[in-house]
Image: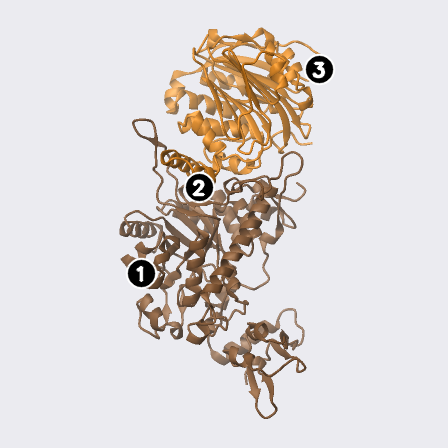
Amino acid sequence: MKKEGEVRIPSGCAISGIVNKSGKRMSGEDIIKSIGIMHDRSNGLGGGFAAYGIYPEYKDYYAFHIFYDSINVKRDCEEFLERHFDIINLSKIPTRKIKEITDEPLIWRYFVTPLPTKLVDSQLSEREFTAKCVFRVNTRIDGAYVFSSGKNMGVFKAVGYPEDVGRFYKLEEYEGWCFTAHGRYPTNTPGWWGGAHPFALLDYSVVHNGEISSYDANRRAIEMYGYKCTLQTDTEVITYIIDYLHRKKGLAFEEIASVIAAPFWQTIEQMPQKERETHEYLRAMFSAQLITGPFSILVGFEGGLMALNDRLKLRSMVVAESGDTVYIASEEAAIRIIQPNLEKVWAPKGGQPVIIKFNGGEA
Amino acid sequence: MNFIYPDYEIVRNPNKCITCRVCERQCANEAHEFLQEENTMTADDAKCVNCHRCVALCPTRALKITESGNTYKQNANWSGKTINEIYRQAGSGGVLLSSMGNPENYPVYFDKILLNASQVTNPSIDPLREPMETKVHLGARPTNIERDQNGHIVNNLPPRISLSMPVMFSAMSYGSISYNAHESMARASAELGIMYNTGEGGLHKNLYKYGENTVVQVASGRFGVHPEYLNSGSAIEIKMGQGAKPGIGGHLPGAKIVGDISRTRMIPEGTDAISPAPHHDIYSIEDLRQLVFSLKEATDYTKPVIVKIAAVHNVAAIASGIARSGADIIAIDGFRGGTGAAPTRMRDHVGIPIELALACVDQRLRDEGIRDNVSLIVGGSIRSSADIVKAVALGADCCYIGSAVLLAFGCHLCRSCHGGKCNWGIATQVPHLVKRLNPEIAHKRLINLMNAWKHEIKEMMGGMGINSIESLKGNRLMLRGVGLNSNELEILGIKHAGE
């Protein structure tokens, strides 16, 4: 059977997210409970979490989370890292042995910053340099896989049910202001940890429920801009599209939503002139970044979280508020299990983004 | 003696024939004759071009055309067609002429590609109940977003073409086809919100009012080109080549250069309009760039420029050069593309299939990171909505259709356009024949065809779970090959069915 990345595997999923608008940190316990209640939406072939605000003591350094197949690969990869980065700290990521999670690779964490001379020579921005190095490891060093590379955030994922993955990584011991979670229901057995979600690049992380029909149009377009879709998953290509539109093209998240879940032409025609022109422009300029087919996504980024459905709303997604905490999940039950007292519960319309930005910034 | 027995036979059922003589009046080739004394009709098969005008108009269905069945001694190497061509050339000493697209038995890749549909993991979308977008925009895209002081996005897009569906009517000149045919295309384009192309014969004054839906062509003969003409359309096409006859220019026999055609082309009546093989101001790619910008200067940078080339062996490299020449759109014409007149050997033996040309051009432009510089239009035998969907999934932005347009008007693909005696009033300038094509009816038939195709495109897209044509563009995972070898699959960039 082919490995993830050699073949395209459609999958259904569950997603959940919790974000505190004022930047108050909470433990990972709630998010595990939330995704766990949607157990039946996963099939034990992939689960994971993204957590923001968890490394305040290293907030100025890129936190690389890396899977290694063997000690030899680890050595090769560390040589590469040392050539390009100043490694401030490195350690195994703490895990808990549980019977539900087996066959784990070596899982390491590095806090790094690009070597100043290398950075100057490359003529790239710090973020572009770092992203390029991540691509290099993932495409050139066979058996090494950087699955998290942002600052003050981290991705934790594995093959298994998400609630087990949470316990495996001791997520309850981390404190962050934003968590997202993913339970995967692939239609094939990848059995590879890198294929689990969230998918992340720099501080962008995406959890996604759906199967997009525009996949190959999106993939071929984004690969023209220097991205390599090695996993052949929707989540991977969506992450790259968001990175491209936000980091490289400077679009705001509201504008990104108008690109990837663009309003229909018939809707645009009825808009006031200024708004209409902007939407016409975005659709013309970024037609290859339009995503069709069912999706509900949670996009984590440095300053917040965006929740978005495809424009026909072909996947469920519910949002709720309680105090300064916002909850988003595939099912309302996944919110009520952790917060029964909600001030507001609603299902956003297809293509209408819910963007939560931190007021306080950081803890 | 010409040695040649007719390929087709006019079969008349005497029990049905009422000797109304419609066939006789309708046949410009004078194949039918009324025998006064016997009060019966007769026919000369040798004059019949198999255009089915008489068959279609016979009120009692007394007529049909069949293969004559006459055959030379069987020979796997020397076919009857080849033998006849030698007899004809031995008799005339001339180059063989043909019309319409290459009819020979080369592979049709569109027929070896199958489309995907959604099942279970992702829902198909019903176009009767949900919006389904077929609108496309053609033109270049800038690299960067610009914003004003307030952070609002500034529209920095160069001039573009907007179409309600990914189809345009390809270049067929006024002269090669009749005024009524041109008017029908112009009116249909305007009603459909798409565009037609003037071809290289200029534009009749009466049709300037459809300028918004017109592409004006500039070809090597520069017939009918003047500032007002250039500014009358919404886009300008430089014709470098044509799929039916790559490497040579257009031909319009003097017999078709009459009246308004001579005026529109700006050449004397009765002179043959023979366009040079190359543009004599374009001997290389840097010259093309100069013509692109000359035309942009002449139109004040208000119109996109299309460069049309024939699909030839090195098409990917050529397209890459054009994408860096300032052109906004590249049109590629496959070896099956039609023509009003071409040397048979050119038509049947030069060029490559559009499916392969499209696949390799789209991939090359992506590999070089310049696919956003241009849009791609492909033509050269797009025969149905399925061909369009497959072409878009391979990477085309839009398709040119020509033969299908003429078929909608009534053309029966008899491939005798070069004779100038088209019984359907399409490829002729004989006034009483031209009258047979009623633009009122013809333009409606063309609108019907396009609306039917649009429905079918939506149906196929919806089946794949796609609700915007943009998400189909270049979406090659939606395609699978059947009966193709690995080399062909690699060039097409698709997997084999079952993979």
Quarter of the N terminus of chain A within the rendering: top right
State which chain disc 2 sits on.
B
- What x and y, as percent, mark residue A322? 53, 12
Colour mode? by chain
What shade does chain A have? orange
Subunit that carries the residue with mark 3: A
Q: Which residue is mark 1?
A: B225
Query: Residue B59's quadrant in the figure?
Result: bottom right
Disc 2 vs disc 3: Cβ atoms closer than 8 Å? no
Q: Amino acid at mark 3?
A: Glu
User: Contact, CB < 8 Å: mark 3 with mark 1?
Assistant: no
- Residue nearest the observer in this picture, B132 or B297: B132
- First of labels 1, 2 by sequence position: 1
Please determine whether, in this image, residue B143 is positioned above or below residue B490: above
Three-letter amino acid code at disc 1?
Answer: Val
Which numbered circle lies on residue B347? none
Q: Position of residue B306 (x, y in %)?
A: 39, 51
Q: x and y percent of residue B208 in the render? A: 34, 59
Are labels 2 and 3 assigned to the same chain? no
Chain designation of label 1: B
Which residue was labeled with disc 2?
A: B371
Which hue is chain B drawn in? brown
A351 displayed left or right of A186: left
